[in-house]
Amino acid sequence: LKIGAKDILDLLTTGDPHFLLLGCDRSGKTSLAKMLYRDAQKEPDLVPVFLVATDLLKKTPAQALDVIEAAFSRQYSPSALDAFRKLEPARRLLIADDLDETGHNRKGLTAIIEKLREHCGKVIVFVDERFGIDEITSGRELPVFANWRQFYIAELGHVLRSRLVQRWVML
């Protein structure tokens, strides 16, 4: 099954609110995440916020809202934060890149993701493919992802990777 950034946004706006995207190193996860963020900004019913794992380092689940609001203020304007707070959660889209690199254990990561979902009705999480393998081999899948749409990002050849990097640099 092939899926592109536009397809994911279409699925988000038609009902599927949560996505887990897995890919190997250099598969274009960060580039895809940034393209989704850029494309989502054009959607009138969505307000996207982009997070990276470092935003959540040493943060507790109780600090998740603070992390989202700080990212929003950096990406938009601190003066728009009050309007963001008043949005219904279904209009808030969180795009979290490298979420498996937050340094949290399974229980902590689950609690963080649940808090992020409380504040943002739509969430797209990008993780390394090892995250999925670890989940399968441990036999203890994170229940927080049980009802999420999950996709693996196919590796790109050198030509497509070059084009993707060029587009990413333009962002």
Image (cartoon, rainbow, N blue to C red):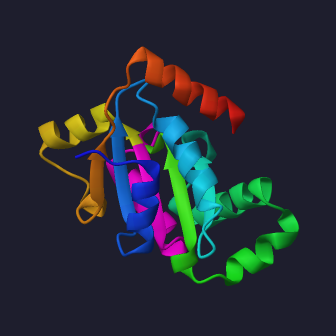
Residue 61 % position (x, y): 51, 61
Residue 19 covered by magenta stretch: no
Is residue 46 at all visible to an observer of this figure?
A: yes
Task: Identify whether 28 is placed above or below 47.
Answer: above
Residue 121 covered by magenta stretch: yes
Task: Identify whether 73 is placed above or below 140.
Answer: below
**102 or 79: which is nearer to us?**
79
Task: Identify whether 159 is placed above or below 142.
Answer: above
**149 or 145: which is nearer to us?**
149
Q: Quadrant of residue 169?
A: top right
**118 or 47: which is nearer to us?**
47
The quadrant of the picture occupied by the C terminus is top right
Could you tell whether 78 is left or right of 29 in the image?
right
Q: Quadrant of residue 34?
A: top right
Q: Residue furthest right?
A: 79
Q: Quadrant of residue 41?
A: bottom right
Q: Residue at x 33, y 48 (%)?
A: 3
Numbered circles on residues, count: 0
Q: Residue at x 50, y 64 (%)?
A: 116
**94 or 40: which is nearer to us?**
40
Residue 97 % position (x, y): 51, 44
Could you tell whether 83 is left or right of 129 in the image?
right
Q: Which residues are magenta?
A: 100-126
Residue 72 % position (x, y): 71, 60
Q: Residue furthest top?
A: 158
Q: Residue at x 62, y 46 (%)?
A: 55
Q: Residue at x 51, y 50 (%)?
A: 96
Is residue 50 at all visible to an observer of this figure?
A: no
Residue 44 % position (x, y): 63, 74
Task: Identify whether 51 is placed above or below 160.
Answer: below
